[in-house]
Image (cartoon, rainbow, N blue to C red):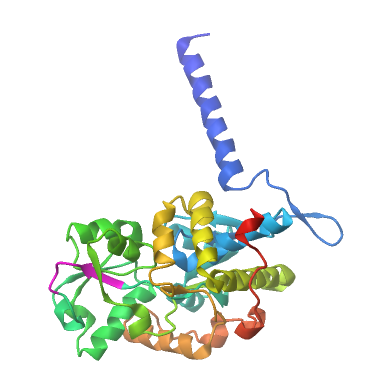
Amino acid sequence: MSFRKTLLITAFVVLGGITLLHGALNLGWFAPRATTASGAARDKFRVGFLPVTCHLTCPVTDFINKQTTGGSNFDPVRFHGWPELKEAYLSGYTPVTFILAPMAIALREQGVPIKIVYLGHREGGDVMVHKDSGIYRTEDLRGKTVAVPGRYANHRLIFYRELKKAGMKLSDVNLVEMPPPDMPAALYSRSVDAITSGEPFPGQTEMDGYGRALYRVKEVWPGFISCVLAVHEDVIKNRRAEVQALVDGIAKSGKWLDANMTNRVDAAQFVSKFYYNQHPRLLEFVLSKPPDRVIYSNLKPLRANFEEIEQLAKEAGILQGTAHFDDYVDTSFAPEDDAVQPHPYATAQR
């Protein structure tokens, strides 16, 4: 056999091996399949998430399910950015996903069959400036460069909301869209003057000693919502019990995270190691300093919260204003907060 043919065969074998490995590790090709009541095989649905604290209940629920029952009723799929997470949902690869609230509303305006069934969190995503900057109030941002995660991020609306209070416009600052993982380095090098995104990236600048909070989101926008859990309407129609089990699990995980600091520190360890591929020191920092930086209780979607988002996003030119709460929210899965009990899972079980 010629050297060229040997090289080609080797290349095909290596490529095939990589493809199989990717399918096994990331796409769940060989994972056990769920069954219907009749015993027929049924794929577990995939749930898209990013390695941010706004989506923390997704890996926490999956991990606790596996530790307590030996399996999980869904497959979490990690993405690295909003564009690929959104495209995975649109393609049907992830019929359930954590997603930015304004992005979900915008998709509904475009006719996409999407329904918000639960929240990912409340609070989180502080606005950070360099500790040595002269920026101490909103007015000091005039003419400055501010990094936001994207057009449909509620973090963009934070600035719009605060600028309005200060009698300023979005045009008074230079907004740039930037992947959140790039924001800490940009602030450190002073390529930008301020950043905001989902944690842990704002918190990273504080932990490393060069970031300072211009304001905590919880102080200027109590009950702030960034990300939500959204489901394709076909899944709601055809697999309602599974959606309910997912929402119930996430609700219990949220209460478990908020129950005590021991649970948060434990979550920082296993989520960083098995799901986020981050150093646990960072996740532990943002889950503990301050302890209520991100809240995982009281996650039922409320009309007043979303109507405020609708109004602000329309004024800011992000939404058209053609979709409203009942169009894109299904509250039937969300339990009342006082009815939710935390997962009965303790660190000692591991």
Between 312 and 334, the residue placed more toward the observer is 334
Between 197 and 306, the residue placed more toward the observer is 197
Q: Is residue 325 on the magenta stretch?
A: no
Q: Is residue 178 among what the camera can see?
A: no
State the residue lying farthest toward the top: 1
Q: Please tell me which residue is depicted at 24% across the width and 69% down the height of the picture.
A: 212
Q: Is residue 130 on the magenta stretch?
A: yes
Between 224 and 98, the residue placed more toward the observer is 224
In the rendered image, the vertical position of residue 14 relative to residue 84, given as above or below: above
State the residue lying farthest toward the right: 38
Region of the chain picked out in magenta, as a range: 127-134
Q: Please tell me which residue is depicted at 42% across the width and 80% down the height of the picture.
A: 224
In the rendered image, the vertical position of residue 165 relative to residue 111, given as above or below: below
Q: Is residue 164 left or right of residue 64?
A: left
In the rendered image, the vertical position of residue 49 relative to residue 232, given as above or below: above
Quarter of the view holding residue 35: bottom right
Q: Is residue 53 among what the camera can see?
A: yes
Q: Please tell me which residue is depicted at 20% across the width and 90% down the height of the picture.
A: 167
Quarter of the view holding residue 170: bottom left
The image shows residue 15 at horizontal and vertical percentages of 52, 31
